[in-house]
Structures are given as structure tokens and as C-alpha cells.
Amino acid sequence: MAAQDTPRLELQNICHSFGSDAAVDGVSLRLHSGEVICLLGPSGCGKSTTLRIAAGVECQDTGAVLVDGKVVSDQTCHMPPENRSIGLMFQDFALFPHLDVGANIAFGLSGSRAEKKARVLTLLDRVELSGYAHKYPHELSGGEQQRVALARAVAPRPRVLLMDEPFSGLDDRLRDDVRDATLELLKDEGTAVLLVTHEPEEAMRMADQIALMRAGRIVQQGAPYNIYNAPKDREAAAFFSDINVVSGVVKNALTETPFGQFLVPGAVDGTEVEIIIRPQHLRLDFDRHGKGPNPTTQEGTPAKGVVARARYLGNHSLVEFEMAYDGSRLQVTVPGVFLPESGRVLWLSMRRDRCFVFPKT
């Protein structure tokens, strides 16, 4: 294998249990220089345990951890964390309160005093904290502390940086700015980053690849666009956004829905299926003939819905309908302000090219 193809970090079939509970179950991934991979999933799915195993603060039961192609942990050896050239960054920042900003960033750096100072000043400029070298952590805001923690983490130029929910303590407005600044610095440094988060938006914003975890396993991995637009199953689709579920039974490769017959090629007669569509992909019409904007042949038969409630959510409105076909509830998002009164009849069209079809589980 060529040197440039050797992963900075590789996990090979990692398994780890706490008692009889399998926290990590056969996790494998490869992380290259300059790449950001997000371990995404709900609390308790094993993502933080996976990160701790990569760092060396937890020892796996089976499998191997490699850094730059060299085994640092398997069933015969376990290199301590401080020898792996892996940086760690957690949500509590963990800055030393008795050291000023400059000393915090310089902690762990090798080289001459002048070299350390130059590295500190360069990183302070990169995180937009020039002039803060002699301030102490208690004098900084949460966002400023996070930037200092980032500068300290990348100062020794680690091969890999492991980040566990590092932005969760910041308010939403500040979080976006700090995430963008963090991503820019990490890309410029060429750092390989493994980021743990439970927030799909954060993963979509930062990751080159998303590894979606569930019950200790990676159930799907891919680029954000692909994993969002081609989810493996209903749970994967629902993790990234609200969904509508239309149920049906297959007969002659077709299933009946409120929107007419829906083609389900290859499905066996009698199979129960779920057609998944996101609220933004349902279209509203004001009459049953589909006279709304941009009609397409992909939208099937308009279905009658009665407004149950409508809410304005800032940049869009969410309208919930009770469907005349079977009494089921479907939600539609509409850009801007659209608040029809309860009981109003509207007609919904379903974008068939934006639907996902899965067997009912």
C-alpha cells in the first residue's frame, strides 16, 4: 500500500462489552489525513466508547487499533494514550485554571522557548484570539475557552484528533461560528479528525463521512449527501429529519396509498411496506386537480387532507393533516408563513422520486 493511502487511524473489527452488554460490536473504519469522520448516533449507541478505545483510555476486548499503519492496540499490546500522537478534545474543554492561555496552549509542546512561543502566537491568531496569551480561563467566554482548547489540542500537531461532543456547551448562534472556525483550522493543519456527536446537523455541517451508529454497530457510512438521500432503513431516515410514513401491502408489485398505486418492484405479494417521505417533499394544492405550482408526473393522484393544526417555526411553517383516505396524519413543511385554519381541506401530492420504501419491521 502506498504511504499516502495508509490511514492515519484504522479500527479493525473493534468489540467491547460492559458485563453482558455489547457497547461496541464489530466497528471498523479508516480515517485519512485531512479527513473528518463523524460518529453519529443516539446516546448509548457506543460512539463515545469507540472514541475512548481509539484514544487508548479504554481497551477493547477484540480487534485492533492502528495509527499510520502500525498496531497500537490489539490482544497482545496496548500503547498508552500519550504515546499514540493522538489529540483529545472534550466538551468540558479541561483547561488548566492556574495557567494563562499561552501556557495552556504550550502545555505538552516540545522545542525551544522561542519555537513554543511562535507556535502559540500562530494558533492564537488562527482562532482569532490574538492578544489573549496572558488571560486566564476564568476571564474567557465559553466560545473563547473552546477556541483555546482547540488551539491546545492541535498545537503538538497530532496525527489524529478525537473530539467528543466538543460544541455541545455552546449556544446555537455561537456554535455555528466556532464549528466553522474549527473546521477551517483542522483542514489547514491536515489533521485527521474523528468527531462524536448526536446532532445530525453538526455531522452534516462538518463531516466528509458520517458513520451512523446504532446498538454498538455502524449501520451506514457515507458522505453526508449520500447518507441523507439514500438512508439504509426507516430509522436512518428518521434520524436526520422528521418523516411521514405511508403503510401498504404489496399486490402485483403495487401497493395502494392515499396518492394512488405505488410501484414496489421486486417485492413479494403480501409484503407489508412503509413508504417514507420527508415533510418538505409533500406538495400542497388548493384543488384536487393539482393546480398548485410546478406540477410533475411524479406526484401521482392528489390526496385529500384536512388541516389538523399549523405552526410557524421561523423560516417555515409546519402543517399537519388528517388524511381522508384512512385517517392517518401527515406533516408538510411550507417555506415562510402559511397558517391555514383547522378544518380546511387541501390536496397533497407526493414526490415519488423523493420517497424511500422499506419492508415493515
Image (cartoon, rainbow, N blue to C red):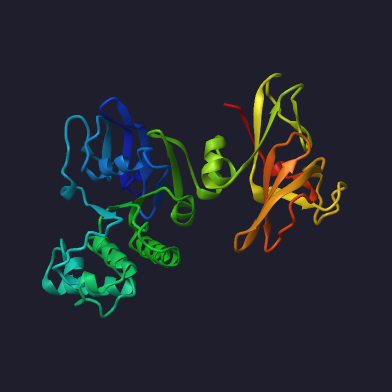
> Can residue 119 be spotted in the picture?
no
Image quarter (top left, top right, bottom left or bottom right) of the N terminus: top left
> Can residue 23 be spotted in the picture?
yes
Query: How many numbered badges does the structure rendering display?
Result: 0
Residue at (17%, 66%) from the top-left corner? 97
Residue 283 image position (x, y, % from top left): 74, 50
In the image, 143 versus 86, the foreground residue is: 143
State whether residue 44 is above or below residue 141: above
Residue 253 image position (x, y, % from top left): 74, 25
In the image, 21 versus 188, the foreground residue is: 21
Residue 154 image position (x, y, % from top left): 27, 61
Residue closest to the far top: 269
Image quarter of residue 16: top left
**Residue 263 left/right relative to 133:** right
Image quarter (top left, top right, bottom left or bottom right) of the C terminus: top right
State whether residue 347 is above or below residue 104: above
In the image, 88 versus 72, the foreground residue is: 88
Residue 107 image position (x, y, % from top left): 16, 64
Image quarter of residue 277: top right
**Residue 224 left/right relative to 250:** left
**Residue 170 left/right relative to 54:** right
Residue at (86%, 53%) from the top-left corner? 291
In the image, 8 versus 348, the foreground residue is: 348
Residue at (25%, 54%) from the top-left corner? 87
State whether residue 272 is above or below residue 196: above
Residue closest to the far front: 342
Residue closest to the far left: 112
Residue closest to the far bottom: 131
State whether residue 151 is above or below residue 299: below
